[in-house]
């Protein structure tokens, strides 16, 4: 129902790289007709060419929504081409890290309804999470349309204020990279204990994905799931004594890493 406007008026996707194509794959899988999606992408992948979307042609006069999925540094170059759609009924939905709502209004017009969202790459397998916040011109139906689009690729979450977006970006936007790095680090540590690289990677990858699935499906807290693995005086306890060290274990390291990402998000806003 909330996607009726897209069916009637079409939509535009500006930039179809890693995140844009993850979103597009979800929309097509959820039944948005490819012919309703107009994509502007100077370097289209084979997948995009074969997807059936309207690629690099004229965009509709009044699309229901324009999704902005170019790098923050490219926004200034890319956005003026869509200026004529500003100050009207078209909703703009940006997924760019660190780009404040006010900056879009400066280019598109101050009356333009704009939503800022932060998805993540597990959207590619329908397991993303996206946080959203809109400016004062976004109506409830606008917000619901954006949520429906993003719900096609995972969970959604409304923020209370825009300042939360830097922390969201640091936790869930960038977060998948931390988990992939955990796989790499566990595999490398397994190698240092004598496993072959292939075997270490198979064990690390299956362990992280298996634990993630358990965290998703279980009613128990993450802390309890950890306790369930930890036999008193056993191997896990020995590892956790290292990882949970308050001075140089994972918690202070994560505070530094997430702090660095949030700081970078704030810098991008300058
Ligand atoms: N990759 C990720 O995990 C996430 C990325 N984001 C945000 O999504 C946006 C895109 O990031 P990625 O997909 O990772 O980058 P990407 O580099 O894979 O994709 C950007 C795309 O924009 C295209 N492009 C460049 N100039 C253009 C123009 N003038 N008009 C139309 N298209 C143009 C590029 O050819 C490229 O395909 C960024 O703003 C980023 O902050 C948000 C959440 C997660
Ligand atoms: O690294 C970045 O800036 C983008 C935003 C969140 C994930 N990737």
Image (tube, grey):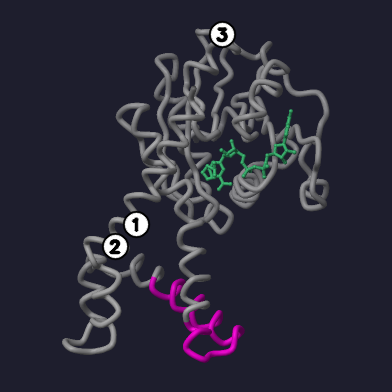
Q: Position of residue 202 (x, y in %)?
A: 55, 82
For the residues bearing labels 1 and 2, Cβ distance under 8 angstroms = yes
Distance in Å between CA atoms under marks 3 and 1: 42 Å
Ligand 1 within 8 Å, label 3 CB: no
Which label belongs to residue 109? Answer: 3
Assess disc 3: are there few (<14), some (14-19) or many (≥20) residues with their C-alpha within 10 Å of its C-alpha: some
Q: Is residue 89 above or below residue 212?
A: above
Q: Magenta stretch: dominant SS?
A: helix
Q: Give ligand 1's quarter of the image.
A: top right
Left or right of residue 174, residue 238 in this image: left
Q: Nearer the viewer, mark 1 or mark 2?
A: 2
Can you tell which of label 3 and label 1 is closer to the viewer?
A: 1
Secondary structure at numbered mark 1: helix
Residue at label 1? 253
On the image, the x and y values in percent for residue 169 come to 44, 41
Question: Horizontal and vertical percent for residue 72?
Answer: 59, 31
User: Could you classify mark 1 by the number of other residues whose Cα lies within 10 Å: few (under 14), some (14-19), or many (20 or more)?
Assistant: some
Q: Which residues are magenta?
A: 190-211
Q: CA distance from mark 3 to mark 2?
A: 48 Å
Residue drawn at 32 percent across, 63 percent down: 250
The vertical placement of 6 against 80, above or below, is below
Q: Residue at x 22, y 69 (%)?
A: 220
The one of 172 and 60 positioned closer to us in this rendering: 172
Q: Image quarter for residue 240?
A: bottom left
Q: Is residue 198 magenta?
A: yes
The outermost residue toward the front is 247
* Mark 2 lies on residue: 248
Q: Earlier in the sequence, mark 3 or mark 2?
A: 3
């Amino acid at each position: 129902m909330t996607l009726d406007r897209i069916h009637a008026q079409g939509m535009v996707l500006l930039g179809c790289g890693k995140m844009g194509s993850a979103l597009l794959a979800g929309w097509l899988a959820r039944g948005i007709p490819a012919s309703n999606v107009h994509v502007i992408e100077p370097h289209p992948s084979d997948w995009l060419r074969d997807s059936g979307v309207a690629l690099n042609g004229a965009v509709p006069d009044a699309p229901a929504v324009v999704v902005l999925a170019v790098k923050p540094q490219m926004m200034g170059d890319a956005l003026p081409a869509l200026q004529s759609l500003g100050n009207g009924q078209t909703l703009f939905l940006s997924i760019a890290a660190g780009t404040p709502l006010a900056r879009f209004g400066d280019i598109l017009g101050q009356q333009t309804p704009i939503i800022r969202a932060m998805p993540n790459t597990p959207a590619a397998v329908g397991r993303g999470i996206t946080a959203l916040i809109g400016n004062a011109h976004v109506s409830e139906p606008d917000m619901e349309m954006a949520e429906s689009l993003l719900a096609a690729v995972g969970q959604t979450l409304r923020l209370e204020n825009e300042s939360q977006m830097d922390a969201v970006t640091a936790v869930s936007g960038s977060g998948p990279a931390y988990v992939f790095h955990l796989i790499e680090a566990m595999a490398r540590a397994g190698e240092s204990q004598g496993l072959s690289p292939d075997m270490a990677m198979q064990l690390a990858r299956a362990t992280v994905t298996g634990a993630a699935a358990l965290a998703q499906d279980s009613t128990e807290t993450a802390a309890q799931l950890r306790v369930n693995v930890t036999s008193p005086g056993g191997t896990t306890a020995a590892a956790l004594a290292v990882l949970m060290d308050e001075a140089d274990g994972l918690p202070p390291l994560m505070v530094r890493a997430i702090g660095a990402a949030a700081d970078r998000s704030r810098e991008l806003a300058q």
